[in-house]
Amino acid sequence: MSSTEVAGPQTENVDDITRVPLPVYVLAFTILAFTTSEFMVSGLMNDLAQDLPASIPSVGYLIAIYALAMVLVAPPASIFLTRFRPKSALIAISVVFIIGELIAAAAPNYSVIVIGRILTGAAAGTAYGVTLSIAAQAVPEKIRGRAIGIVMGGNTIGTVIGLPVASFLGNTFGWRLAFAFVAVLAATALVASFVLVPAVDAGPRPKILAQLSELRNGSLWLAYATSGLLIGGVFSIFSYFSPILTDRAGFDQSWVPIILAAYGVACVLGITVVSRLSDDFPLTVACVGAVVIFLSGLLFLLGDSNSVVVLIGVAALGFAGVSLNPAFAVRVMRVGGISFVVNTVHTSIICFGIFLGASLGGVIIDLSGSVHSVYYLSLAFAGLGIVALIPKLGTARAELTK
């Protein structure tokens, strides 16, 4: 396994360049189902608080519990699952996720729904690593970035489509139906995976120490740090879009869903472009994206009272924010390999960046009394992400000259 980054993928035969196969889209649908579960609590807060009963902050913790389960449980779970074929691991993960959603749907009180969220969060965090590893093995290296982009596109589509559908069902027919709906989505993905996803070879079963040795790689952790810092910079602002749009930019509350939908469209466009470029220019894409995230933070800092400036900032964060994930993933795979231990740890670090951006942003807003102060946090995260990329500028330049 190489501990250094190369400027581009190895040369592939033209005959090896094929269309992305159907199983990759099945993996994307799996991620769509899991992502819908992650954030749908935000749209069901009032109903959950009234019915469980629980306070609004306690309901909000259900999102943090999900994220922390992804961060803390997924890496050791992925090490254990290397004993099985990736397809078998994916099926087991999907079963655990469905059980967790059904527990949440039937929860008689807050404590039981917490158990459901821990199970679903742990399963979702592990699923990212497994699905990315299967996708990477199921296609030629030349189109690996495109395949990864499609799988991660399930995350974006889950936010843009799955989340509002689940929220609509929950608000109209009760929050339990929303959880049941996600369980049905995951069950559909499970059947499709069982039928269509190939049983790629897991290779020899490594011992635990051998698996952990994959992570003893300085370049890999530099790539991990870049991903976590830049995503933290995005979510420092994204998590507080609603008060930024209404309290700072002066939009009416009725405009917030429309602007968030436009943000989702920008994400879809961004991930489409990034996934096409990530095969040949992962570091270059990451560098450009880091600069865009930093400049977006400056836009918000200097002009968040101007509605046009804010809209430009929202579009920029959508186009070059979470859509950078395919480039991050290709870079990590080139440095650390395509095992789902490496990929799951990467996912956990990205989730930790989300958690830090959102939670530290809340602390800063509480201390300062103004959402305006959160932009400084975003600039700090993005600035550190740029610093982490500086040692690789030579490799980025080499990508452009190949």
Image: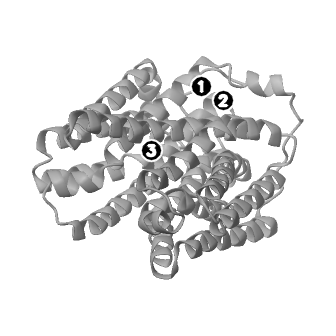
Q: Residues within 10 Å of mark 3 (few under 14, many from 20)?
A: many
- The residue lying at 59 percent from left, 17 percent from top is 218
Residue at the left extreme, as displayed? 306
Return the residue nearer the eye: 135 or 212.
212
Residue 229 percent coordinates (x, y): 43, 31
Q: Which residue is mark 2?
A: 336
**Tag 3's secondary structure?**
helix
Residue 13 percent coordinates (x, y): 68, 47
Q: Amino acid at mark 3?
A: Leu
Q: Is residue 5 above or below residue 256?
A: above
Query: In the rendered image, is residue 288 in sight?
Result: no
Residue 126 percent coordinates (x, y): 68, 46
- Is disc 2 in contact with disc 1, using a CB cutoff of under 8 Å? yes
The image quadrant of residue 150 is bottom right
Query: In the rendered image, is residue 110 in sight?
Result: yes
* Colour basis: one colour
Q: Amino acid at mark 2?
A: Gly
Q: CA distance from mark 2 to mark 1?
A: 6 Å
Q: What number of labels is visible? A: 3
- The residue lying at 67 percent from left, 73 percent from top is 184
Q: Which residue is mark 3?
A: 324
Locate residue 397 relative to residue 199 in the image: left or right. Answer: left
Q: Amino acid at mark 1?
A: Leu
